[in-house]
Structures are given as structure tokens and as C-alpha cells.
Image: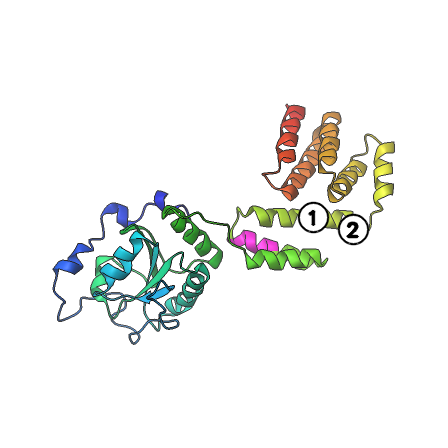
Amino acid sequence: MSDPRMTSSIFTRGAVDLSALRSTPPATSRPATPAQTGPPAGLPGGPATGGGGLAVVDVTEATLQSEVLERSMATPVVVFFGAAGYPESDQFAPILERLAAEGGGAWVLARIDVQENPRIAQMFQIQALPTVYAVVGGRPIDAFPGVVPEAQLRQWIQAVLKAGGATVAEPEDPRLDEADDALMSGDLDAAERAYRKILAESPADAAAEAGLAQVGLARRVAGADPQAALAAAAQAPDDVDAHLLAADIEVLGGQAEQAYARLVGLVRRTAGDDRERVRQHLVSLFTVAGPDDPAVASARRALASALF
């Protein structure tokens, strides 16, 4: 999901008028909502822990002003619209509650039962359960219906916090910890599966891309004799295979800049398919280091010069 400040949502189209809740007396009969003709009332998940700056609060018409609008002036509020008995709602609520608890008060989860509060649901034009909104500074800024993967939800919450002016540290990702542990233990198949799973959910995850590149690197050097490989490359300046292996060994030995220079030089000396193969191999080594490595930036410039 994108930064909430840049996302087009129903709020930017003027679809929500919260003032109506303060000016309209409670209805004697409830208007139809997506949840009115369904399972029994009650929100899924655990009991609310709101009050005193804690993570989760249950909200009604009477408390919407104080618990959502006023609270959001100081702390971002994520509003969850749901109802017990709806499978996706039942599935998603505990995830939000867990993330709110992990947040340690950085944001508050406000749960609204649409069966008990149909007028709020109408004001927000709820069309699906669950639906999640972000409210910052007394103003709704973004929304999404349905269930999203946890990794995507975490990114969205981070963007909400940034929109609220918070300095956000990158959260630890247990999926990456699992993948990294598999890589360090030498279980390359498990590590590859774990990194690919992360990339399927978060295609631009640089850490997972780097991890997957490390898996490839580890496989390429398995069983190689480092000294023999480096000596073979020194004796055969035009042997592409020998220099690719030597570059891999240099990266693993902490000599990444030397490896990059080796392959940039090989790019200059080769052509056609061999040249493209060397270029792709060098790019894979850049991925191992990550895009912010100064040595990578320098080597990319050298590669561009060699190519063009």
C-alpha cells in the first residue's frame, strides 16, 4: 500500500460526514448495513484494552468523538469495522489487535461493531467487512476494504504513523529472521523458500532480495577451493567461468570491491552472450550487498562506463 497522504480514498471525495452523528438523534430503527442481516452482534477478537493510553478500544456512537476524532489529534487511530461471525472479519481482527499491542501506544486500534453501530457504518459508507480506516489529526486519511497480508498491513501502518508525524523505525520482520536463520544454518532450500515467500507478498523487499541472492552465491561456491579458484582465474584472464567463481569467493571473503573490479574488467574484455552473462552475475553480487552500499554505487558507475 502507498503512503496514506498520497492515496485516493473515499475521504478525499467527501463521502464521510461525521458531523451527522453529533446532530442527528439516535434512530429508533436501524438502517440497513452490510452486517444487519447476518451473524449475531459482537466483535471478534479479544476484549478491548483501551483507556489509559492502551492499544485497543471499542467505539460506539457515544464515544466516537472522544475515542477516535479527539484521540487522533495526538495519536494515529486505526478504525476497524467488523462483526462477529463474518469469516474475514474474525480472521483479521486478532491480527490488528496483535499489531496494536506490538505498537506500544504508537497508534490505537478502535473497533466498531457495525451491527451495534449501523449509523456509523452508514456515515463511513461501509460496503464490505472488514473495512479499515486511518484517522490522523481528527481527519480520516485512508481506507481499505477486506483482508490484506500481514506484511502489507505492517507497511500501511508504518505509513499511517509517518503521516501522523512519527519517526518510524523499521520493524523487525520475523519472516526475515526465519529465512536468515535457515541461510546461516546452511539449509539453502528452506532459505530460498522463505525468501521467495516474502517476495511474493512484498515484491520490493530489498532484504529478501539480498537474502535470495546470498542463497545463489552460497550454492555457486559450494565445494570450491578458494585458493585454487583464485589461482585458476589468475592463470586464465579470459575464462569467464573461472572469473565468475573467483568474484563469488572474493565477495564471501570480504573483498567485494575487488570482485566488482574483476567483473567490470571482464565486461570490457568480452562481448555478446559472455558479456551479458558477466553483467548479470555482477548485478546479482550488487543485490547481495544492497542498494545503499557505497561500493555498489561506485561499481555501478564503472559498469555503465564499461558497457557504454
Q: Amino acid at mark 1?
A: Gly
> Mark 2 or mark 1, which has the lower sequence index?
1
Q: Residue visible at 82% across and 47% down? A: 224
Q: Is residue 48 above or below residue 4?
A: below
Of the residues shown, which amino acid type is indicated by label 2?
Ala
| Residue beneath disc 2 | 222
Q: Is residue 148 left or right of residue 260?
A: left
Name the image quarter holding residue 79: bottom left
Indicate the quadrant where residue 95 lies.
bottom left
Give residue 216's mark: 1
Residue 54: percent from left, percent from top: 37, 64
Residue 289 coordinates in the image, percent (x, y): 64, 42
Which span of residues is magenta-colored? 195-201
Residue at screen point 25% across, 72% down: 37
> What kind of element bears circle 1?
helix
Q: Nearer the viewer, residue 272 or 235?
A: 235
- Residue 282 image point, x, y percent: 68, 36
Q: Residues within 10 Å of mark 1 (few under 14, many from 20)?
A: some
Of 198 and 60, the residue lying toward us? 60
**280 is within the stretch colored magenta:** no
Residue drawn where x is 65% and y is 37% of the image:
283
- Secondary structure that dominates the magenta span: helix
Q: Secondary structure at mark 2?
A: loop
> Residue at coordinates 65% horizontally, 39% vertically from top-left?
286
- Residues under numbered marks 2 and 1 in contact, where contact means CB atoms less than 8 Å apart: no
Residue 87, image quadrant = bottom left
* Relative to 211, residue 42 above or below: below
